[in-house]
Amino acid sequence: MQISTLEAIEILGTVAFAISGSFAAMQKRLDPFGVLIIAFVTSIGGGTVRDLLLGDTPVAWMRDVNYCLLILLTSIATIFFKTHIKKFKVTLFLFDSLGLGLFTMLGIQKGIVFGLSPGICIALGTITGCFGGIIRDTLLNTIPLIFKREVYATACILGGVLYYALLYFNLKDDVAQIVVMAFIFALRIVVVRYKLTLPRFGF
Amino acid sequence: MQISTLEAIEILGTVAFAISGSFAAMQKRLDPFGVLIIAFVTSIGGGTVRDLLLGDTPVAWMRDVNYCLLILLTSIATIFFKTHIKKFKVTLFLFDSLGLGLFTMLGIQKGIVFGLSPGICIALGTITGCFGGIIRDTLLNTIPLIFKREVYATACILGGVLYYALLYFNLKDDVAQIVVMAFIFALRIVVVRYKLTLPRFGF
Amino acid sequence: MQISTLEAIEILGTVAFAISGSFAAMQKRLDPFGVLIIAFVTSIGGGTVRDLLLGDTPVAWMRDVNYCLLILLTSIATIFFKTHIKKFKVTLFLFDSLGLGLFTMLGIQKGIVFGLSPGICIALGTITGCFGGIIRDTLLNTIPLIFKREVYATACILGGVLYYALLYFNLKDDVAQIVVMAFIFALRIVVVRYKLTLPRFGF
């Protein structure tokens, strides 16, 4: 039961990031193979870095060819349906935020499976959520979303803290996971919609 | 016999990428240690990422100091012979393309040794071939060749598909390997020479 | 005794790089979480890449939450004390150079523990010393210090060679380590102060 929930999250997150990667690559007018490669690294980037850090190798996507097929099909479907989508930038943003929430939760769960302490698990969740997008933006030569001051990694960290707070108050694990994923997704939307920023320390 | 063929490919690929790395670093007017470092990361970058993903650690170059010596000597030789080479840009391109073909084949072979499925092996070959050059170009602050729309990663993917097609039609493994390496090398030259590009999806 | 010396070096190096990361992030006017993340990756970047290459996973900072706490506290302290520091650029440079010397020695020692040959150990030391700073500068979108022609990686390589030379002449190991760390720190200061550069090979 627990495992199937995690699997569902992983499939949803993979699809969300594959769509966000395909959109970003099409926006940069890459050729079909380029779109596929960017969709691929966006989807598997975060989980790959997480698995490397944990030493859980061969990394996940190598052990299950289905994820590669899922990304391939998602990428092709995105290319075909693009003419039906008008608000391009908004779509990219929504799927990126959705993937962020899903993968952050997944990273935290994997840390718990490996018996790591809460602080490390939150760091692992943040890495899992953020790295796919960071690699995507770096490869496409755009400034990574994480540095656009839109409370990106911060959303993952706050989501992770919220998760442990909810568990502390005896919320059911499954419910807490869904609340946290919705929180990260909603936080990103609110922050970008109302152009909120954290105070910063400069000179 | 099989192993010695692979070893020969690895030595040739290491030398080719060490030369391409040295040339790129000299073009940017780095100091001698800088040239050596760029030659080093270009040569070992692809194989290192491949070994990390597979969990085959300590990574290859740490287990065999001979590869480090080979890169060192190649780099020094390249510095000394540079005055004899006129068409600098062409030389860099040729050795980069040669290394691409050799390392792609090597990555596929290593994936097969690890018992991975064809799709994953092709991805692994593409990673092995491309990452040395990507790291080289990123460190030198130039736009990676892979994004210059010159059918770079695409050549690796097509080469990998060709390899499995040749095996499917019962071609001898050694012959298939040589055909694929020559195919990737030739494809890069044809594409750049005639400025071919794939159609792309933009807005 | 040997272990405690290494631990002391690691703690000092972690603090030095956490300070240098916090300063660099504040200079770019990041928000509090941004400063924390940059302090974190600067401190753990080099050791993480080293441990990944060696296959020593889960990587060090995941096994000991104390390092994360140390970085967190250092980062907060740096933010609070910033108003007392006038020569910002100089402070960043000094702590970066200090961390470079400490982490280079640490990487060499870890290579020796893994039974690797001197050449590989020096490479490992250079990676441990340089990568935290490279990742910091890459994430902050500034040109990495390593490419500013200030004898950065070169200092690590020369320090590593000096270490093996001192051991060869039967200097006590602990003394040799301290000499090498002081050498790297001093070399960086002399080079930047007097704007020294190595000759380079261009066209």
Image (cartoon, coloured by chain):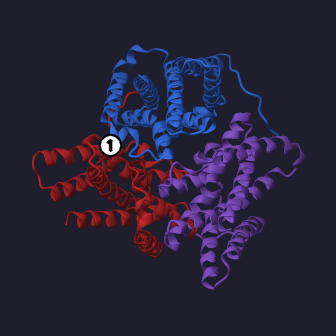
Chain colours: A red, B purple, C blue
Nearer-the-camera pick, B112 or C170: C170
Q: Is residue B147 left or right of residue C13?
A: right
Q: Quadrant of the C terminus of chain C?
A: top right
Nearer-the-camera pick, C40 or C91: C40
Q: Residue at x 61, y 19 (%)?
A: C170
Q: Quadrant of residue C172?
A: top right
Return the x and y of residue C34 as percentages of the image width and height. Answer: 38, 37
Mark 1 neighbour class, 10 Å CA radius: few under 14, some 14 to 19, many 20 or more: many
Instruction: Note whether residue A82 is visible.
Output: yes
Residue type for callout 1? Thr
- Is C54 above or below relative to C149? below
Q: Residue at x 36, y 27 (%)?
A: C75
Return the x and y of residue B185 as percentages of the image width and height. Answer: 73, 66
Query: Residue under circle 1?
Result: A154
Instruction: Note whether residue B101 is visible.
Output: no
Return the x and y of residue C53 as percentages of the image width and height. Answer: 51, 46
Q: Is residue A38 left or right of residue B98?
A: left
Mark 1 — on which chain does it sit? A
Return the x and y of residue A144 as percentages of the image width and height. Answer: 46, 48
Nearer-the-camera pick, B192 or C155: C155
